[in-house]
Image (cartoon, helix red, strand yellow):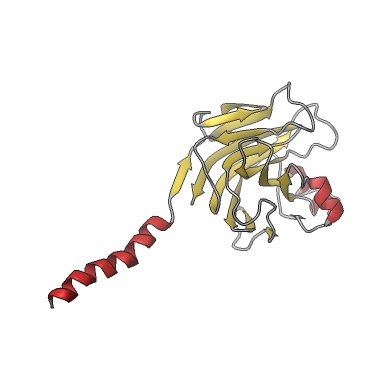
Amino acid sequence: MTWRLSVLPLAFSALVLPVALAAQATQYALTSVAGLRLHNVSAEPATLEGRQGLKVTMTADARLPTDERLAVVTVTDFGDGVIEAEVAGDVQPGAFEGARGFVGIAFRVHSDLRTFDAFYLRPTNGRADDQVRRNHATQYISHPEWTWSKLRQDFPSRYESYVDLAPGRWTKVRIDVRGEKARLYVDDAKEPTLIVNDLKTAPNGRGAVALWIDNGTVAHFRNLSITR
């Protein structure tokens, strides 16, 4: 009887501890720039549609197209897990004709701030009259090699998809990353909007999480959550 009493607590701990430690979520309200490393972007607290967040725009001295535009969460080391946020993107006044309000989330960001995977939205494409343009509403990229243009040229339609979007509107995004696979969910959809089965950073890629924008964009971010 003594032997059984000494073993049972160990067996119980082995079953319970992995569950308790498996998922740890870190929340970032994004109402200030605290904890962010700004790279070729400026950021300031702002209110959009009555909700507080961060307004992010490109700095004037950023070189195009070589310089990435990121606000890096400085304490993150992300490999697999779930990233959630509310984002909004719109075209900056006076932007070039092809501006689409590009806004997204980069992950597995390396220290060079050039190597990462990302999902992003083109909000002005979501309700365009041109169906082909609608089909480019969401995008996966893996910089520096796999830009949107190279992916579209080499693998038409594989790394982008349609979803209903509107510029200047808060949109929920959720990115589920598992090894070399990732899923992008938009708003409260139960099914993914975009599926990637071959992340270019490979199954064991790791790095930071960052807010991502591209040229000609006024972006807003709020309520970032990272679960690992």
Quarter holding residue 18: bottom left
**Residue at (70% x, 48% y) in the render:** 165
Quarter holding residue 168: top right
**Residue at (85% x, 34% y) in the render:** 97
Q: Is residue 7 above or below residue 68?
A: below
* Viewer-side residue, 126 vs 143: 143
* Viewer-side residue, 198 vs 57: 198
Farthest bottom residue in view: 1
x, y (%) of residue 159? 75, 55
**Residue at (83% x, 52% y) in the render:** 152
Q: Is residue 116 above or below residue 67?
A: below
- Is residue 22 visible in the rendered image? The answer is yes
x, y (%) of residue 121? 70, 46
- Is residue 188 visible in the rendered image? The answer is no
Farthest front residue in view: 3
Farthest left residue in view: 2
Q: Is residue 96 left or right of residue 142?
A: right
Quarter holding residue 192: bottom right
Quadrant that contains the N terminus: bottom left
**Residue at (45% x, 44% y) in the render:** 26
* Viewer-side residue, 139 vs 29: 139
How many numbered discs, if any? 0
x, y (%) of residue 96? 84, 31
Q: Is residue 78 left or right of residue 102?
A: left
x, y (%) of residue 19? 38, 62
